[in-house]
Image (tube, rainbow, N blue to C red):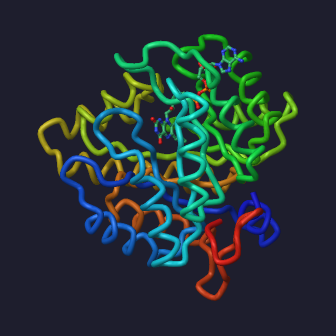
Amino acid sequence: ADIYAAARAAGRQPVSFEIFPPKGDLTLEAAHEVAAELADLLPDFVSVTYSAGGSGNRQATADVAAMIHDDFDIPTVAHLTCLGATEESISRAIDDLKRKGIASVLALRGDRTADAPAAEGPFRFAKDLVMRLADEGFCVGAAAYPEGHIECTDFRASVAHLKQKQDAGACFFVTQLFFDNSYYYRFREAADAAGIAVPIACGVMPFLGKAQIQRMVFMCGASLPSPIIKLLAKYEDDPGSLRAAGIEYACAQLTDLQQHGADGLHVYTMNQPDIARACAGALRASWRPAGEAAVRGAGEPAGGRA
Ligand code: FAD
């Protein structure tokens, strides 16, 4: 929250990156190399995803968030999900975050899986986790859905659920990916009308290939505008050109959002530093000047993470 306020006071929008922690073949050393390349670009903060399923090590998120702060002096936000969580498991996660000096968390419910098909227990919705983390003194962010969440067909209900997260203590939001900026502009207006005053940063993910975009759209329900469909058709047999077109499309999207005064710009880097570099180049005017110190988050322990 402090980062958004300070950037706004300086007349610019914060630019942040998302990375995922080691899983599968990715080692901690490889994650460190990715983080080093991202840190060179001086983002306002880096967020680290949380893998609730079997593919990831749950503690890796906090480890990588701590590593990025300690080794590169970049503020970090650790993601945490609560689907299927108990009071005990959340208390353990909170203790781990505190032990590692993490002060800012993106509180999420998590996607339904075969292991956890329904939301039940003390943490049914993200707002329940938001409240618990805010009570513990964390600076808490949460997810927002410009096109509505895939399980919620009523746009106004989606906005009302966002307001509940703000009321529970969320002090910033990051959106799900979208490929048509008009959804964000309409959503921001609806959020304003519903009394949502905290920043809603735009999550932008470049499409890199046909299979990836199909998977993403199927998972989150984002609409595919016709310019993207045309690019997919044009470069059907040329994956290199399709990837380059996807990054170029994301850069144009970010520039448009910047010009329209979006609250913040969050790039899903997918651990590929060339994506972050291209976006940094497109967003030069929003960039934190090299001489400007990183803002530390509210409630941060001395020498800790934002
Ligand atoms: P909620 O806000 O709880 O919403 C879930 C559903 O419940 C929605 O349909 C909502 O409309 C509905 N709902 C909410 N409150 C109520 C209520 N009071 N009554 C009735 N219905 C309600 N997933 C991961 O596993 N790891 C990650 O690191 C991760 N990072 C993400 C980062 C961002 C920026 C985003 C946008 C998503 C991320 N996700 C991640 C995916 C996220 O977990 C899914 O989108 C999940 O399906 C919903 O999570 P949520 O926090 O929005 O849940």
Q: Quadrant of ligand 1?
A: top right
Q: Residue furthest bottom?
A: 291
> In screen coordinates, is 240 left or right of 269?
left
> In screen coordinates, is 182 left or right of 157?
left
Quadrant where the C terminus lies? bottom right
Q: Residue at x 60, y 48 (%)?
A: 94
Residue 151 vertical position relative to residue 249 in the rendered view, above or below: above
Foreground of the two, 227 or 53: 53
Foreground of the two, 256 or 216: 216
Q: Residue furthest left?
A: 237
Residue 104 vertical position relative to residue 300 in the rendered view, above or below: above
Foreground of the two, 68 or 244: 68
Foreground of the two, 8 or 126: 126
Quadrant for residue 212, please give it: top left
Q: Position of residue 74 (x, y in %)?
A: 55, 72
Q: Residue furthest front?
A: 88
Q: Position of residue 250 (x, y in %)?
A: 44, 50
Q: Residue at x 28, y 38 (%)?
A: 55
Q: Residue at x 45, y 29 (%)?
A: 225
Q: Position of residue 43 (x, y in %)?
A: 54, 69
Q: Position of residue 164 (x, y in %)?
A: 78, 27
